[in-house]
Image: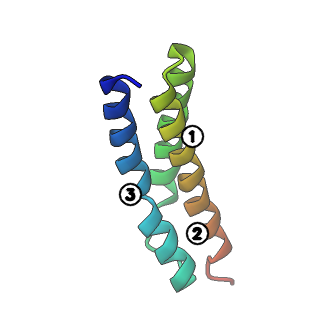
Amino acid sequence: METIDLLGLAAGGLTTVSFVPQVLKIWRSKSGQDVSYGMFALFSAGVGLWLLYGYLLDAKPIIVANAITLCLALVVIVLKYHYRPRA
């Protein structure tokens, strides 16, 4: 593997792993009240475009990092909805 690919994997790995604490916090507290749907929707759309970009370039580090990040962002949205206050 080339050095530039390792750099891409490291960068993608760090930004991807940064979502794990948020997912765990929502899961443990059973509350996503402070999470913004709008921010995560826009973020997910951006990550989806990065994923498409990586696919079109056949850039594995971009594809892997953004596929995992998109999944984690969608988990945050789903958990926020699941743990929403019921009327």
Which of label 3 and label 2 is nearer to you?
3
Among the 4 quarters of the image, the one containing residue 83: bottom right
Secondary structure category for the residue under label 1: helix
Task: Judge left or right: residue 6 versus residue 76.
Answer: left
- Identify the residue shown where x is 58% and y is 69%: 80
> Which residue matches tag 2?
80
Task: Estimate the spatial distance between the alpha carbons at disc 3 and disc 1, rounded to whole Å.
Answer: 14 Å
The amino acid pointed to by label 1 is Ala
Q: Quadrant of the C terminus?
A: bottom right
Task: Estimate the spatial distance between the alpha carbons at disc 2 and disc 1, rounded to whole Å.
Answer: 20 Å
The reply to whether callout 3 and callout 1 are in contact (CB within 8 Å) is no
Q: Position of residue 66 (x, y in %)?
A: 50, 38
Secondary structure category for the residue under label 3: loop
**In the rendered image, the vertical position of residue 66 relative to residue 23, given as above or below:** above
Q: Which mark is residue 67?
A: 1
Residue occupying the far front of the picture: 1
- Identify the residue shown where x is 53% and y is 53%: 73
Q: Which mark is residue 18?
A: 3
The reply to whether callout 2 and callout 1 are in contact (CB within 8 Å) is no
- Identify the residue shown where x is 46% and y is 45%: 43
